[in-house]
Image (cartoon, helix red, strand yellow):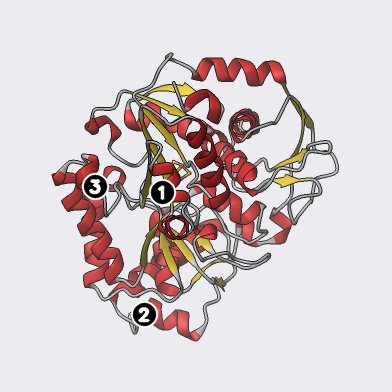
Amino acid sequence: MELTKAEEAMLHGEKGGAKQKAMEILVALGKIYGARRMVRISSAQISGVSYKTIGDAGLEYLKHMAALGGRVEVPSFLNPAGMDTEQWEEMGFPPDFAKKQIEILDAYSTMGIKTTCTCTPYLAGIRPAADEHIAWSESSAVSFANSVLGARTNREGGPSALCAALCGVTPLYGLHLKENRVAKMVVRVEAKLEERSDYGLLGLLVGKKSIEDGKRGEKIPAFRLAGLKPGEDELKYLGAAMAASGSVPLYFVEGITPEWNVEPDAPEVMVTQGEMDALKEKLNEADSADLITLGCPHASLAELEEIAQKLEKRPVEKELWVCVSRAVLQVARENGIAKRIEENGGRLVADTCMVVAPLERMGHKCTAVDSGKAATYLPTMCAQKLVFGKLEEILWK
Ligand code: F3S
């Protein structure tokens, strides 16, 4: 790879041990993927934050990098951690888990990384423009940045995003190059898309169709939605679900996303109402949940307003978590939306989410969700049975 003088200096240890290790990894990745050079990034979003997912080995690695003097070169945010850092005790998170989680956040903080833990950095002050190069790792954030914002990122792993943050660059390959941002399947939908949960179901189905040839993340879908105009929240649910079921890092929606670039002979696939109904039925394993969780990906202010209005009409009786970034929570506190949710039985939960929190250790057995991504991971990562449906269908189950 051609490296600049500054990159060579990092590789030879002139900028400290952490940057040296990070640059070694970036160069190795660049060679594997055939990158000619590095490209500067404007931000990083780093996964591998919850103690539940990275464990002691991950914690030791982060402490080591921090002790080597690693400091980030670009604004860098974290993925959700394993707990709400302010409410963990009253919410019943295990103290041994909390202790390790705080050590992880401290190690990241020592490296200059903002301990804003969210999968929606674009709602929390880090919103890249079209064609801007970034290194993000949480799969729904990657999908949103590439597809809805038109920014350019590969689906980084936690370590490679951290390396990119420490060096300020990432290898120039994959979705950083325009020629690779081409749809290889056209999706038509003959089904009702009324709520976010419908977009989640659609995303799960299309993600699965995209890997029918066994290759994950390579078949970029392009949607023709015939007059429908999904907003950012719907697109957020769609992308998160496709990333979960098919590792899809980029998609296009005709007339809505900034890019529309489809291979001339791309095959057409259809999603029918029958498929959507069958999947919804399959995801519903129980009549009633002991926990309701919303905000996967983390909720926007518009979603919080919708939830507040529903709860004002009928308060919730079961435990309800609404997962948000701390930045959105702060605005919701200032404008009173948070209070309206809390007065009617809901709890706003920041820094974490239903999937990376240790729900299984907190006594929960069955969780209600409206998100395709949460429905994919809760059974395997949290040993949860599922109730799946539209907001109105799950709030009072
Ligand atoms: Fe975000 Fe957690 Fe869902 S990271 S996309 S809320 S599984």
Is residue 171 visible to the viewer in this orientation of the structure?
yes
User: SS of the residue at dot 2?
Assistant: loop
Task: Looking at this view, name the residue that lies furthest to the right.
Answer: 264
Residue 93, quarter of the rendered image: top left
User: SS of the residue at dot 1?
Assistant: helix
**Going 43% across and 74% down the picture, which residue do you hit?**
167
* Mark 3 vs ligand 1: CB below 8 Å: no
Q: Position of residue 267 (x, y in %)?
A: 79, 33
Q: Which mark is residue 88?
A: 3
Neighbour tally class for label 3: few under 14, some 14-19, many 20 plus, Cα within 10 Å? some
Query: Do residues under tags 1 and 3 come within 8 Å of each other at their CB atoms?
Result: no
**Going 47% across and 42% down the picture, which residue do you hit?**
295
Q: Which mark is residue 372?
A: none
Q: Position of residue 103 (x, y in %)?
A: 20, 58
**Going 54% across and 46% down the picture, which residue do you hit?**
305
Neighbour tally class for label 1: few under 14, some 14-19, many 20 plus, Cα within 10 Å? some
* Residue type at tag 1: Lys
Instruction: Determine whether, in the image, residue 186 is placed left or right of residue 347.
Output: right
* Residue type at tag 2: His
First in sequence: mark 2 or mark 1? Answer: 2
User: SS of the residue at dot 3?
Assistant: helix
Camera-side residue of 105 and 312: 312
Q: Which mark is residue 339?
A: 1
Neighbour tally class for label 2: few under 14, some 14-19, many 20 plus, Cα within 10 Å? some
Instruction: Determine whether, in the image, residue 380 is placed left or right of residue 240.
Output: left
* Residue type at tag 3: Trp
Q: Which residue is mark 2?
A: 12
